[in-house]
Amino acid sequence: MVRISAALLLLATVGGCSRASHDTDADEAAIRELVRQTAAANNAADTLAWVALFDEGAVYMAPGMPEVTGRDGLMDVAAAGFGPYAAAVKITPIEIEVLGDWAFARSHVSGSVTPRAGGDPIVVDSKQLVLYRRQLDGSWKIARLIMNSNS
């Protein structure tokens, strides 16, 4: 019991130091900007811009697909989605929490994707949980993106 309490105290102290050394308002603003850039890259079908938002070891978990890890896999995912579809989506953060060098955003994604070959737009109504990791240069990148549909 003493070891567990000491370990928890150490984690709380380390976490507190890391958290105190950063401006959480600026971190939250940086996360909001990443959310904006994510929607913009989707809407522009910009594969390189979208993949650049992710951490080197990122994991992407979309419904009905196996998880994708790393930037090479993300390039494949983006090419498969951006090629056949034109997106018009909005990502609305509902909750953002910064916890030291990690942060998360719970968001609602709405809009539509339209097949480039023709056809009716497909309504997008989903939720996502995105974990962000602070990089060595102080910037933020997507470390994990988990989403599923509301319908």
Image (spheres, rainbow, N blue to C red):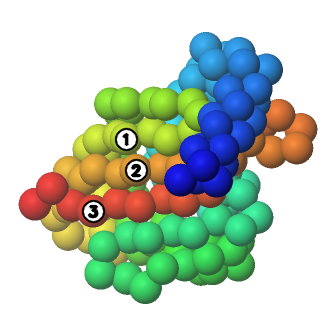
Name the disc covering residue 134, or none.
Answer: none
Residue under pointer 2: 129
Q: Residue at x 37, y 41 (%)?
A: 106
Q: In the shown orientation, is residue 129 left or right of residue 23?
A: left
Write down the residue under mark 1: 106
Decide: marks 1, 3 in contact (CB < 8 A)?
no
Seen at 57% across and 39% down, the residue is 103
Secondary structure state at the residue bearing disc 3: strand
Calculate the distance from the C-alpha at mark 2 to the C-alpha at mark 1. Answer: 5 Å
- Give the residue at the far right of this rendering: 137
Please report contact status of discs 2 and 3: CB closer than 8 Å, yes or no. Answer: no
Residue identifier under label 3 = 148
Closer-to-camera residue (49/24): 24
Q: Residue furthest bottom?
A: 66
Q: Position of residue 12 (x, y in %)?
A: 63, 35
Q: Which quadrant would the C terminus be assigned to in this image?
A: bottom left
